[in-house]
Amino acid sequence: MASEASRKAGDGRSGGGAPSDPVRDIAAAWERERPGTPVSSIGIVTSIWQLAKLFGDDRRRVLARAGVDTATLDLLSVLRRSGEPYTLSTREIGRRSMITAGAVSQRVARAEREGLVARHPAQGRPRTVEVTLTATGHEVVEATVDQVLHREAELLDGLAPEKQAELTDLLRTLLRDVQDRLGDDRLTHVGED
Amino acid sequence: MASEASRKAGDGRSGGGAPSDPVRDIAAAWERERPGTPVSSIGIVTSIWQLAKLFGDDRRRVLARAGVDTATLDLLSVLRRSGEPYTLSTREIGRRSMITAGAVSQRVARAEREGLVARHPAQGRPRTVEVTLTATGHEVVEATVDQVLHREAELLDGLAPEKQAELTDLLRTLLRDVQDRLGDDRLTHVGED
DNA sequence: AGGTCTAAATTTAGAGCTAAACGTAGCAGT
DNA sequence: ACTGCTACGTTTAGCTCTAAATTTAGACCT
């Protein structure tokens, strides 16, 4: 079937008999092959990357059964969550979904083709286009969101509640920090609304 | 796919006084709009997602300057890390990179076209193909890996070392757990629901 | 008014992925 | 020897993204 790469044994032999830790093995392999390689970030960045892949693949499969794709659900969700009148500018959608303007155009075009959203020029602001959820689009969100979120909660189930809270905190801190860093670094552009 | 994503400034007004937390705002927006929505996973899953996106985008930009793409570097890195003779079967590459067999074929074909790897049938094992790093491929890894890893360490710099260690631990635990769960699921879940 | 600037969205080219169909080649049972 | 099974890699169709080029329409000079 797919990318599920279920069992992983990491790069090398995972050593002796200790519980296998594929991510740690990657750092160890770099050190073995290239002593001095700056591996300090691997434990965090690679784990995050792999978890995102697992969650993403799983979500895609869950949604495929419902005949929706993840990009479309993301668009519909952003609109649904924004509350009445379920309308946002394409610009705002791009910011909230972290994708380029071109990607927004394409997502909206696809969703519009399927009758899930409608597009119309914003009055008052000349060149901006507003996107609104249709009744059908609204229904799709209602029919799928709980499923997706419930499934994800299930996947986190193995981690004790206190651990989940700790993890949430650490990730929040890191996310804020990385965002600031990249914001400053890359964009001199004053992007915050 | 940026999932339930939102970015800075979150969904609703993040005002109110507390420091803005866009991810928490997403959960709050769902609860406001659809009381009872199972939002418990959002603090972890959405953060992971957004971090993966930020790291990934950044890595792409760093590598673009060196004229390499992330998929190719991933392939070359897996081979490089595996040590002499820098050779793995396509099957093994897919497992380690968490991508489908088709994706491996395409990655290898692209890299082969650029002279970075070579393909040859494995002797001994009938239907399997082995992929080996060429001298050029080896050079590309040496020229870029430190850059990428160093950059990523820099991005984590804002998080105190103890926090990094805690985070690494929690992510390792979660990753192992999610992997087991998805692995089992695929095996048990043979039919549809 | 007419030309230029600019901010917004869209379109295009091309990378990259998944899922599924396909091609191949040993192997196992009869 | 023949038939079908199985394990592997490759190809194809279709989706989705980014970056860059293009379109669009007010705004700002002179």
Image: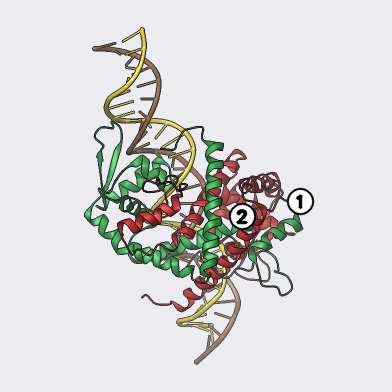
Chain colours: A green, B red, C brown, D yellow
Asked if disc 1 and disc 2 are in contact, CB closer than 8 Å, the reply is no
Figure check: C5 above or below B106 = above
Left or right, residue A90 beside residue B133: left
Q: Residues within 10 Å of mark 1 (few under 14, many from 20)?
A: few
Q: Chain of mark 2?
A: B
Percent coordinates x, y for residue A99 in the rendering? 43, 45
User: How far apart in space, not on screen, are marks 1 and 2 (Cα)?
Assistant: 21 Å
Residue A90, can we see it?
A: yes
- In the picture, measured across the screen, residue B117 lies left or right of residue A114, that is right
Q: Residue at x 41, y 43 (%)?
A: A95
Task: Answer few, some or many: residues within 10 Å of disc 2's Cα (few below 14, many 20 plus, some between 14 and 19).
Answer: many
The location of residue B36, given as percent across then percent down, is 33, 65
Identify the subunit bearing mark 1. A
Nearest the camera: B48 or B28?
Answer: B28
Q: Secondary structure at mark 2?
A: helix
Image location of residue A174, percent across then percent down:
56, 51
Residue that label 1 marks: A36
**How far across and down, in percent of the image, does residue A65 sit?**
35, 67
> Residue A128 is drawn in which quadrant?
top left
Q: Secondary structure at mark 1?
A: loop
Would you say residue B105 is visible in this rendering? no
* Res B75 label: 2
The amino acid marked with disc number 2 is Leu
